[in-house]
Amino acid sequence: MIRYALTRLGLLVLGLAVASVLIFVSLRVLPGDVAQVIAGTQATPEQIAALRASLGLDAPLWTQYADWIGGLLRGDLGTSLLTGTSVSAELIDKARVTVPLSIMSLTIALLIGIPFGVLSALGRRRAAGAALSVAAQALAAVPVVWAGLMLVVVFAVGLGWLPPQGFPRAGWNDPAAAFRALVLPALTIGVIEGAMLLRFVRSATLQAIGQDYVRTAAAKGLTRTRALLSHGLPNVGLSVITVLGLQIAGIIVGAVVIEQLFTLPGVGRMLVTDVASRDLPKVQGELLAVTGFVLIVGFVVDLAHRLIDPRQREAE
């Protein structure tokens, strides 16, 4: 197990290294010039060139990359060219919105996907099970922006229960208002991700129902439902853990769109704003932080899978 963990950790570090190169190179091919943005439209070419030199933008790309990696090794994600603020500090500040939003979305997805996925599989020959399956198919195909707009129309404009956009200025110092501001965005992501999870849980449960160990347990006197719950669902859980790793990444990506739609001051909205303003050091720090988070989630999922599933340990 230790050797497996070290191997996966090495792959994680390698993945971060490759991601850093791809992020750095891809941002340099984007059109636009941050020196032009800072200097303004009235600046002369000489002024822009002097500003580029002062910011270090005229240095060779390999030098800029080496400086960035050197900062990363010291725990510094960089400094914004436009505001001069620390990227790490601003990421932590914006994460106070994105992290709770992601946790709420994942919780909603789990509450929808797991129990209703099992019920849909157990009731596959009944109308309720078929209705759950059809509803999941429909919800999984709904664009996240359209779903968010519909929730706003119903619960904010129509019923007036929740705020349509924004986040309180006091932030989490006013927890009730902050929580209410995240309910609709979390529902938007959670319902769609939950529908996708429901479909997977239903498929995995149906596969487990047909396994020999479930039929054997039923032959020994257990009902089919009890045999599934006691013997089949633990094996379904192994597959669900793997899918959850992918869904967490999907939730992070969905947060970029949702924060724009609901004007939430989170990491996703900050990233879109910084890309538009060509603040390259800030963007590359943000992208690497998000990429690192997704890779760490995959690393944790792999370790959890190995710890829970004895067959993998026996094979090793």
Image (cartoon, grey):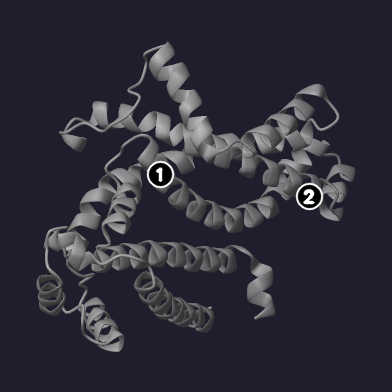
Quarter of the image that includes the C terminus: bottom right
* On screen, residue 289 above or below 235: below
- Residue 235 or residue 230, whichever sits in front: 235
Pick out the residue farthest to the top. 159
Marks 1 and 2, the one that precedes in the sequence? 1
**Residue 266 seen from this side:** yes
- Residue 5 or residue 147, whichever sits in front: 147
Q: Residue at x 14, y 75 (%)?
A: 55
Residue 4 appears left or right of 158: right
Q: Residues within 10 Å of mark 2 (few under 14, many from 20)?
A: many
What numbered label is drawn on residue 103?
1
Residue 40, position as x, y percentages in the image: 14, 58
**Residue 85 seen from this side:** no
Displayed quadrant of residue 192: top right
Tell me the kind of residue under disc 1: Ile
Q: Residue at x 56, y 42 (%)?
A: 193
Residue 57, position as x, y percentages in the image: 21, 77
> How far apart are the two marked residues, 1 and 2, measured between alpha carbons?
29 Å
Residue 228 appears left or right of 105: right
Q: Residue at x 35, y 24 (%)?
A: 164
* On screen, residue 292 above or below 2: above
Tell me the kind of residue under disc 2: Ala
Mark 2 lies on residue: 208
